[in-house]
Image (cartoon, rainbow, N blue to C red):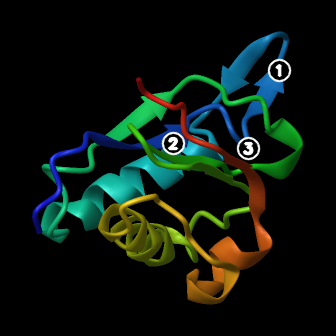
Amino acid sequence: MDNTTAHSLFVCTTCASVWQDGKRIGESGGQKLLHQLQELAQDWELREEFPIQAVECMSACNRSCVVAFAAEGKMTYLFGDLAVDDSISAVLECATKYYKKPDGLLPWSERPEPLKKGILAKIPSLSLK
């Protein structure tokens, strides 16, 4: 693929946390999602071009678990309501489609099922002049 734009797949690591006395107990759902994505991405064709980055919080706590696709000059997408064990391959499949689109536009009909229902935001790209 001939795409030189830097891409990022952000994963919220505080999603689906259990809190007690102001401290997180055990591994959060977001951390599990991150680890599963990292594991599956070892064989992903875009693992070098589309790094997976942990984010402490993406402020979508009531819609966890949450990921975002971002790239310079493309739409940014925020997806939530992702089931930890059932969404991993769908996230990478959708990221691949995002990577291949020059504008990053992901029509509803082209998204894998878990990412059709869980869209939280589609943010226009910044105009670079």
Which residue position holds label 2?
A: 11
User: Where's the C terminus, which quadrant?
Assistant: top left
Q: Nearer the viewer, mark 2 or mark 1?
A: 2
Side of 23 relative to 93 (left or right): right
Q: Secondary structure at mark 2?
A: strand
Q: Is residue 98 above or below residue 12?
A: below
Nearer-N-terminus badge (3/2)? 2
x and y percent of residue 31 in the render?
51, 41
Measure the alpha-carbon separation of dots 3 and 2.
12 Å
Measure the alpha-carbon separation of dots 3 and 1.
13 Å
The numbered dot on residue 31 is: none
Q: Nearer the viewer, residue 66 or 111?
A: 111
The numbered dot on residue 20 is: 1
x and y percent of residue 90 in the render?
49, 77
Q: Secondary structure at mark 3?
A: loop
Quarter occupied by residue 106: bottom right
Q: Is residue 59 above or below residue 38?
A: above
Q: Residue at x 80, y 25 (%)?
A: 19
Direction right: furthest residue:
62
Measure the alpha-carbon separation of dots 2 and 1.
23 Å
Mark 3 neighbour class, 10 Å CA radius: few under 14, some 14 to 19, many 20 or more: many
User: Where's the N terminus, which quadrant?
Assistant: bottom left
x and y percent of residue 57 in the render?
65, 26
